[in-house]
Amino acid sequence: MEKLIEKLIQAGYRITKPRLMVLQNLSDNHTPLSARSLHKKLKMFDRASIYRVLNLFEELGIVNFEIIKKEKIYCLANDPHHHIACRKCGYMERIKCDHFFYNFKNFKNISHQLTVIGVCNKCDK
């Protein structure tokens, strides 16, 4: 988490309580969180503050997001990965990402999204 805090400072941003609390919650969770679920955990901050923090983190490459069941979910961008989600119960597991994109002639700052949905073993019984 220290590297991500340093990234904020190097980009010229202060370490405010909302930013630190969102970072801490994303760091403590093993599954991605939506802005709505972060707001429920951090009731001391209004929803707009949570969205502003997440948008800033997204711009700076501190978080990655995926869209699962029409909801944007966020996790720290420590290493390239995606998630697979159970369409029945919502259980998620992390999937390592081996997709690397190089040398697109007319593009820079390339990123990608991958949505993987299935039925977990528990729900398949």
Image (cartoon, grey):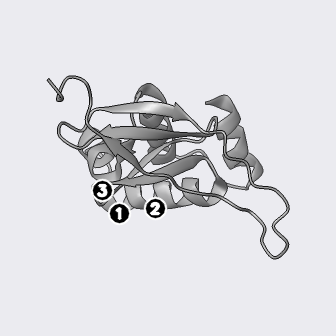
Residue under circle 3? 46
Q: Residues within 10 Å of mark 2 (few under 14, many from 20)?
A: few
Q: Residues within 10 Å of mark 1 (few under 14, many from 20)?
A: few
User: Left or right of 29: which side holds 123?
Assistant: left
Q: Position of residue 51 (x, y in %)?
A: 40, 60
User: Left or right of 55: which side holds 98?
Assistant: right
**Does residue 124 lie above or below 65 as drawn?**
above
Which is nearer the eye, 26 or 106?
106
Q: Residues within 10 Å of mark 3 (few under 14, many from 20)?
A: few
Name the residue rendered at 67%, 46% in the picture. Answer: 99
Amino acid under label 1? Ala
Q: Where on the picture, by quarter, is residue 81?
A: top right
Name the residue rendered at 25%, 24% in the picture. Answer: 121
Q: Position of residue 40 (x, y in %)?
A: 23, 44
Residue under circle 2? 52
Amino acid under label 3? Asp
**Does residue 46 lie above or below 25 as drawn?**
below
Q: Which of the two discs, 3 and 2, sits closer to the camera?
A: 2
Q: Secondary structure at mark 1?
A: helix
The residues bearing labels 1 and 3 have C-alpha atoms spaced at a distance of 6 Å
User: Left or right of 101: which side holds 48?
Assistant: left
Amino acid under label 2? Arg
Q: Position of residue 75 (x, y in %)?
A: 48, 41
